[in-house]
Image (cartoon, grey):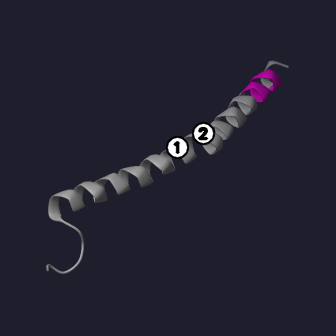
Amino acid sequence: MEEKDDSSLGKRHETRLFLFLIILLFPLLSIALVGGYGFVVWMLQLIMGPPGPPA
């Protein structure tokens, strides 16, 4: 009987972890990565000038 309780508890924990990853962590991580990339491009353009051939 104890094995069933441990198994259901583990499955419940696994389900909550999956929902946390899908609903919260992955969207926040993707926003942070895209925002970080945009910030790096913005800073490089401030330092090196806009893209394109020199005038």
Residue 51 position (above or below residue 29): below
**Which residue is painted at 82% across and 25% down in the image?**
4
Residue that badge 2 annotates: 24
The residue that label 1 is drawn on is: 28
- Whether pointer 2 and pointer 1 mark residues with C-beta atoms closer than 8 Å, the reply is yes
* Segment tinted magenta in the rendering: 4-9
In the image, what residue occupies the spot 74% across and 33% down?
11
Q: Please say whether residue 51 is one of the residues in the magenta stretch.
A: no
Instruction: Name the residue rendered at 18%, 65% in the picture.
Output: 49
Residue 33: horizontal and vertical position, in percent? 42, 51
What is the x, y in percent for residue 46? Answer: 21, 57
Q: Amino acid at mark 2?
A: Leu
- State the residue in front, 31 or 46: 46
Name the secondary structure under disc 1: helix
Tag 1: Cα neighbours inside 10 Å, few (<14), some, or many (≥20)?
Answer: few
Indicate the quadrant containing the C terminus: top left, top right, bottom left or bottom right: bottom left
Quarter placement of the N terminus? top right
Q: Dividing the picture into quarters, in which one does residue 40 lie?
A: bottom left
